[in-house]
Image (cartoon, helix red, strand yellow):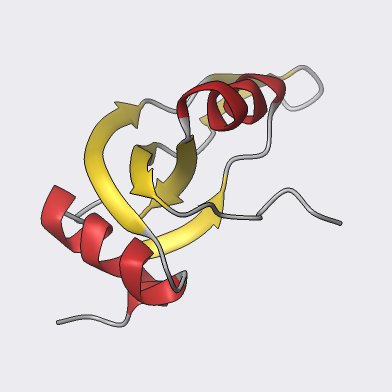
Amino acid sequence: MRDPHDVIINPVVSEKSYISAEDNNAYTFIVAPDASKPEISDAIEAIFAGVKVAKVNTLNRKGKLVRNRRANTVSSRPTTKRAIVTLSEGEIDIYAS
């Protein structure tokens, strides 16, 4: 088994993910591209004590193309994998400053 911090890279802090966390107890994380759903579930339960994962949904987001006007080149932002983790027990306080 991998280190849980290698599976979960960082939380997604956005308005949409904040509302989802309040209403549905679902949190969004950027995860390793080769992470599976059971790995993500185990990593969340290992990192945050007292949390029970109900389900994990994953999605791959393709990186957007970025155009550089001065050099006339096109590059792309990195492709990321996100996991929406719904909890049955417990709460994660990732939005506290």
Which image quadrant for residue 54? top left
Q: Does the image show residue 7?
A: no
Is the residue 96 above or below the residue 1 in the image? above
How far across and down, in percent of the image, does residue 74 sit?
A: 56, 23
Residue at point 24% right, 39% down?
56
Number of disc labels = 0
Residue lying farthest to the front in this orientation: 89
In this view, the residue in front, 24 or 30, is: 24
In this view, the residue in front, 94 or 67, is: 94
Residue at point 36% right, 62% down?
44
Is the residue 35 above or below the residue 87 in the image? below
How far across and down, in percent of the image, does residue 18 sit?
A: 65, 29
Q: Is residue 69 left or right of residue 11?
A: right
In this view, the residue in front, 80 or 77, is: 80
- The quarter of the picture where the N terminus appears is bottom left
How far across and down, in percent of the image, does residue 6 sit?
A: 37, 73
- The quarter of the picture where the C terminus appears is bottom right
Residue at point 37% right, 25% down?
62
Is the residue 84 above or below the residue 45 in the image? above
Q: Does the image show residue 4?
A: yes
In this view, the residue in front, 76 or 6, is: 6
